[in-house]
Image: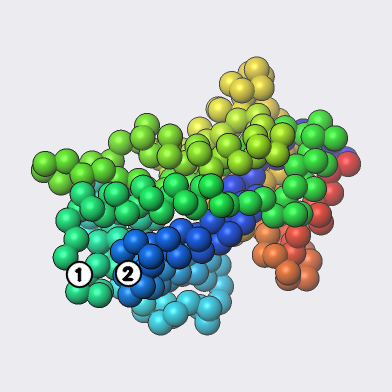
Amino acid sequence: MVRIQHAFCDLDDTHLHFMAGHRPAIAFLAKEVGQKFANAFDATYQVLHLGGQAQDGDWSMVPGGQEAYEQLRKKLQLTKIGSRSFPWSRELAALHAAQVVDMQLHPREAVEIAAKYWAILSSNITLYPDALRFLGRLKAEGVQNHISTGSDSSLRWAENGWVYDPKLAKKIKMFRVRVLDEFGFSPASVTTGDPIDKPDKAFYEQVMLNACIETDLTTIDPATCITVGDSFRGDVAMPMQCLGIPQGYWLQRGQPRRQLTENIHLIGSLDEIPLE
Ligand SMILES: [Mg+2]
């Protein structure tokens, strides 16, 4: 059997306990902007987040089901810059929430709200206990950890409308990656979905290129890699297909482990990934 040398891992909900940061950020918005607004902002996020996961199967967890998810995405996709849409933009979520509760909100205020949301979230987010153990095992086994994480779709407002600046968006996202540093686990490379995002093939090619650059290798044999994350398509199926990685682990915390295909395993905890 080939020894595993590289792990391509998702960040949010794989390493990081996203809700541990999201909840205090929502509580802050309730205090600063109002409870109704905070509820609508939270609901916008929940439908998008759970809807994104439901595409892997079950829609019963999504408030309003598939219809609510499709409608919301359609609404937010009205704000397109070039061919790109920004479903994860908290700036757009703030505008949408204001509309739902019939509150006047200038896009500039939406930008301020989003900035505060991310600041509170980033300072409260934590590592899952199994992620902490997994990072320790990667280190002990000499397996390089490469983070591949989607864009936060951060936008800013200019005179003429919304502007997407990939460098700024990446900078905001990197605050969250630094949580790993705080625990002493600096990843070998980090790829964020700015400007090209999951599940675009070019995103995964960039992940591999960044992995080579950061580890000073001309090539990495995909047979020595695994891919890990909580999104079946974005973190497992697509990187396996695009990079030729033979082993994928789809993380669904709390679920019993089962083998989905010859090469894809559903795991309930990162502890279940064999590295030796
Ligand atoms: Mg994730």
Instruction: Tell me, yes or no, if residue 6 can be seen here.
Output: yes
Q: Which mark is residue 254?
A: none
Q: Assess mark 1: CB under 8 A from ligand 1?
A: no
- Number of other residues with Cα within 10 Å of mark 2, as a class: few under 14, some 14 to 19, many 20 or more: few
Q: Secondary structure at mark 2?
A: loop
Instruction: Determine which residue is flagged by label 1.
Output: 103
Q: Secondary structure at mark 1?
A: loop
Instruction: Tell me, yes or no, if residue 73 can be seen here.
Output: no
* 159 over 14 or under it: above or below: above
* 129 over 146 or under it: above or below: below
The picture places residue 247, in percent across and down from the top left corner, at 73, 48
* 19 over 157 or under it: above or below: below
- Amino acid type of the residue tagged 1 in the rendering: Met
Tell me whether circle 1 and circle 2 mark residues in contact (CB < 8 Å). Answer: yes
Of callouts 1 and 2, the N-terminal one: 2
Q: Quadrant of residue 222?
A: top right
Residue located 76% across and 54% down the image: 130
Work out whether residue 219 or residue 114 is closer to the camera in this orientation and state it.
114
User: In the rendered view, does 165 fall on the left or right side of 105?
Assistant: right
Residue located 43% across and 34% down the image: 171
Instruction: Determine which residue is flagged by label 2.
Output: 34
The picture places residue 267, in percent across and down from the top left corner, at 74, 61
- Amino acid type of the residue tagged 2 in the rendering: Gly
User: In the rendered view, does 91 fall on the left or right side of 19?
Assistant: left
Residue located 63% across and 51% down the image: 126
